[in-house]
Amino acid sequence: MNLKLENILNCTNGKLIIGDKTKDCNNFSKDTRTLQKGDTYIGIKGEKFDGSLFWKEAFEKGADTVIINKIDLEKEEIEKYKQKNKCIIQVEDTIKALAQMASYKRQLYNNKLKVIGVTGSVGKTSTKDKIASVIYQKYKTLKTEGNNNNHIGLPLTILSLKDEEVAVIEMGMNHLGEISYLTQIAKPDIAVITNIGTSHIGNLGSRKNILKAKLEILDGMENKVLVINNDNDLLNQWNLENKEKIDIHTFGIHHTSEFQAENIILNENTSQFTCNHKNEKFDIFVPVGGEHFILNALCATAVGNLLGLNKEEIINGIKNFKLTAKRMEINHLKNNIILINDSYNASYESMKAAILSLKNRKGKRKIAVLGDMFELGEFSEKLHREVGVEVCKNKIDALFLIGENAKYIGEEAEKNGLDKENIRYFNQKELLLSELKKNLQEGDVILFKASNGMRLFEMVENLKKELGE
């Protein structure tokens, strides 16, 4: 169900400068660097540049159609591309137009498509990936690629729909109102909330406000079906207060839930457990270590069950799940050194889980390379200090720190017993990397973890290149 130019003009109130209204628009792109021949290019205006200014480059790269803001166009250039059967649409605001086109396309699918909306403070991407892996066992499935979960990435994901039967859509936010905007586009049939933590607490002011922001996912739902982590304190309480009003399905380890994990066995790289659902029990193997991956396996089980998958399909989907890059990615280097790349993003909760995973790995020394967690506002010092407590609680041997607030991790780790000689603070990645290389020993296990803006993945790539097997 492709959009035609005529549909785009109607739903965006755009103006056709050149082109055939009956032309199909199959694929959409906002980046001329990755644009493919025949794509429709959308010129997004960002903080640093206006993508609409690259419309000619998009045509030269093979785009058939461009959708741009109302910028000045030269008559000679318009005529040139008219002769090449190209199409140009101008709109008031390309970001708004993107949402309008995605909403229109979602409506075209109506009851032919089931949408699973996934949000939460941490674990959205791995949960989305695991749900998609399960659903794929029975249905043709589209999922959000990477973490394209914002007001641009989500509409582009919807616009990429072809003949899928289920779409697993991730929804992120920094402020109140943002998930409400996204859910009105995606119109989920089932919503998932992985947890309520401290991510973006600097913007929202409290965990209660974070809960409020995540619950906005219900705004776009006609029949509200919600899957939640019952081990999370705020979601557990919210469930008790609202279970008579909304169709809620729970999963958990520590609190009695509809989908309950029992007989848990945690290994370095894998785990397994028994899922108890209404007294029907079946064993599930998870190809990743860590208790949090058992929780998102339970979540995927719940969603699979709601969509009519049998237990064999669910078991196979979880067994074949693969993590998105830079999330607890295990790399084996020379001299039996293990590198854990979890550099994509960080909150207190994900730091805590990653440090626990580091502790549980076999190795000579456990080294944590940690950087700042962003968007914590007035809570920043407190939460960085709590990470320092976790470092000592889990008996991490050495800390390499970088970032303005990472110093609090070191101060608290020292207070709680980590030898000062094993805490090193740097203000440049190059210096940290150089010192780390000098100190590496055979059998070390190293964790890299920080918010993505710290760009610790650059150090990871350097180590992989120099010390990869």
Image (cartoon, helix red, strand yellow):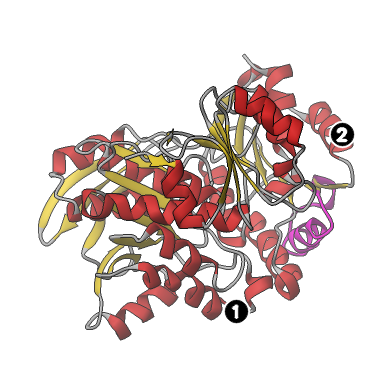
| Secondary structure under the numbered disc 2 in the rendered image | helix
Q: Amino acid at mark 1?
A: Ser
> Alpha-carbon neighbours of circle 1 within 10 Å: few (<14), some, or many (≥20)?
some
Q: Judge whether residue 170 can be spotted in this image.
A: no
Which residue is found at the position 33% from the left and 46% from the top? 167
The residue tagged 1 is 206
Magenta span: 402-422
Tell me where residue 368 appears, x and y as whole percent. 69, 44
Which residue is found at the position 52% from the left and 62% from the top? 121
Which of the pair 131/5 is nearer the observer? Answer: 5
Which residue is found at the position 75% from the left and 75% from the top? 378
Which corner quadrant holds the N terminus?
A: top left
Q: Is residue 342 left or right of residue 202?
A: left
Q: Amino acid at mark 2?
A: Glu
**Disc sitting over residue 104 in the figure:** none
The residue tagged 2 is 430
Which of the pair 360/108 is nearer the observer? Answer: 108
